[in-house]
Image: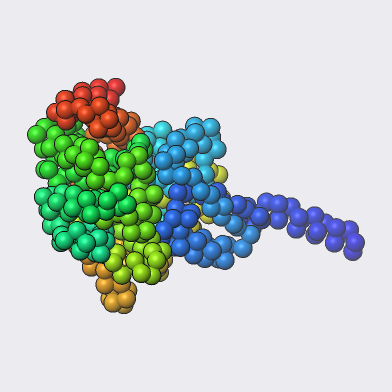
Amino acid sequence: MRSILRHLCLAAALCIAGLPQAHADTKLRFYSWQTDDQSNSVWWLAVNKAFQDAHPGVSIEFIKVPRDDFADTMMVMFSGDTPPDIVHLASFEFNAFAEQDWLEDLGAWIAKDGPDLNGWAGQGKCVWQGKTYCINLNYFGYLLYYNEALLKTASVGVPKNWEGYLDAARKMTTSGAGKSFGIGLHTTAGPGQYLTELLAFVLDAGGYWTDKSGKPSIDTPAVIEGLRRWKLVQTERLTPMGVKGEDIRQLFVEGRIGMRLDGPWMWGLLAKARPDLRDSLKVTEPPETVPVGGASNVIAMPSSLPPERKQLVWEFIKLITSPHWQEQYVALTGQLAPRRGSLTPEILAQKPFLATFQASQDKAAAAGVDRLPAGFESKYNEFAKIITEEAQRMVIDDADPAAVARRMQQRATELQAN
């Protein structure tokens, strides 16, 4: 009898040892820049907990990496064969990882039991060379956040075009007497934020970085005009100089910035303003003729994971893309989710400002706008560094925007050819 029991115990132990890691203590590493941001972190923390509750023995290590360092950090991890289990990337970054075969083709997973991607906003950006390597988590249109009290003090209204925007920026800066500025721009180096904010000026002037065939179209009158406007608001010191976007956002909620062009993710930060300031902080559609827009961030998995970990990551992806958690994304973050129908009448009644978000997003989508220029899908960071370096030199050295555009065109053409 004892012998039989020993054999049974041994067999049980062997079975347990052979079970997938999900039944033991398993940690999924998840690196993100949104672990403690203004709004997205609330949703991530809630969905992470829901996943852990549904998978006893599995925990998610939610680890912060600053946005400006994120792509480089992920490159180092993947090239060293130590990728995170859950891959979170900006939409304009994933192509470079897919090109190295570092990301799993999700086509078979989606076909088996994945989310319904019909009408999924921005999902087309997750398709690279005919394969689906990610699922888009956010599609946005830029918005104008403004301080109504500062506008009134400067005796100007909410701008509806470039001329009104410039006039309001000048008058609010003057009335601020060095204590506040008319606008707030991200003016430090950083491939994502800097280029996105510069693009707002270029788009409004009628330009874009590439043409429909994906060839650089920088040395054109419209892009040159956008660069001129970008230089003008900085040389006139209508914005604090050398400040990152996240710090500009903080200055805005402190009442020291009159206007800020930004995405819907900034809405959550307004709640942190002092009670005497909060009612003055408003949001409306941007004054640009065409708003900056596009896919924002995506979720993916490494192709090098063992099967049992891939299954766990896929379960996580299914959870966050489910109807319930897509609706919760809207409810908790105050942003639009990509899944069709996620903005329910009930949520809209509670958050009427989302109608403004939808209007801007629809305009960007109708114009086919995206921060990721065609032709540079797998070289976006290198492209962004070129534009950023030359645009900063334009401001610092007081360079001619036309000459700067020619230099950008030359360098971008060489990058594309290599």
Side of 252 where 72 appears, left or right: right
Q: Position of residue 367 (x, y in %)?
A: 15, 50
Does any portion of residue 283 appear in the rendered image?
no
Query: What quarter of the picture does the N terminus occupy?
Result: bottom right
- Residue farthest to the left, as pictured: 221
Where 22 sits versus 301, above or below?
A: below
Side of 265 where 226 appears, left or right: left
Side of 207 where 74 appears, left or right: right
Given residues 257 and 324, the one toward you in this image is: 257
Where 149 sits versus 68, above or below?
A: below
Q: Position of residue 169 (x, y in %)?
A: 20, 51
Given residues 115 and 72, the one toward you in this image is: 72
Q: Residue at point 53% right, 32% down?
A: 80
Q: Position of residue 72 (x, y in %)?
A: 44, 35
Q: Residue at point 44% right, 53% down?
A: 34
Query: What quarter of the picture does the C terminus occupy?
Result: top left
Q: Residue at point 11% right, 32% down?
A: 220
The part of the image, by quadrant, that contains residue 120 is bottom left
Q: Residue at point 18% right, 39% down?
A: 232
The part of the image, by quadrant, that contains residue 240 is top left
